[in-house]
Image: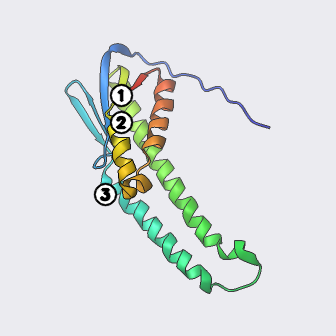
Amino acid sequence: MLAIFEIKKEKHKLRPEVVAEASLSLEYPIIVKIGKAKLSIGRREEFLYRRLAIQSACKRTRQGVKYARSGNGRKRKTKALAKFRDKERNYVDNRLHVYSRELINFCVKHQTGTLILLNQEEKIELAKEEAFVLRNWSYYDLMTKIKYKAEKAGIELIIG
């Protein structure tokens, strides 16, 4: 059985003529500008430092699995490895939710009716070229969370 939930839209006093321009980048996950107001959300060091630490711990664990006590199957041996994979996935998911929520709250505070994500095709092409960026930045997931939260808040989203 699949559960179906209907999410109610939040009611805010938004003005459609106010436009926010947001850009996803490597140095700061989100940079948003509304008129003269500008906000940088997150930092590269903060996001990558923790993620790379979890990845290196996972790598160390993967190397140590072959020396684990035998018996009771493969699943028991790789339990710690699965825990680190879950930890990384949860960390990234949490950070992306925090970043997208900050963006939408900033837009609502300034009564923004339209949010434009700038130069996303260029960022996606850059990410495809570099393996490190493709593996460690979750642009598509961040855009999905922004889209969901913007729709919930009643903000029109334009990806360009």
Name which quarter of the figure residue 23 lies in: top left
Residue 54 rendering spot, x and y as whole percentages: 46, 66
* Amino acid, disc 2: Gln
The one of 12 and 15 positioned closer to us in this rendering: 15
Q: Residue at x 43, y 60 (%)?
A: 51
Q: CA distance from mark 1 to mark 3?
A: 27 Å
Q: CA distance from mark 2 to mark 3?
A: 22 Å
* Local crowd size for mark 3, using a 10 Å CA cut-off: few (<14), some (14–19), many (≥20): few
Which residue matches tag 1?
Answer: 160
58 left or right of 68? left
Which residue matches tag 2?
Answer: 120
Labels 2 & 1 near each other (Cβ < 8 A): yes
Tell which circle, 2 or 3, labels the residue nearer the N-terminal end. 3
* Amino acid, disc 1: Gly
Q: CA distance from mark 2 to mark 1?
A: 6 Å
Residue 44 rendering spot, x and y as whole percentages: 31, 53
Which residue matches tag 3?
Answer: 45
Q: Secondary structure at mark 2?
A: helix
* Amino acid, disc 3: Glu
6 left or right of 31? right
Q: Secondary structure at mark 1?
A: loop
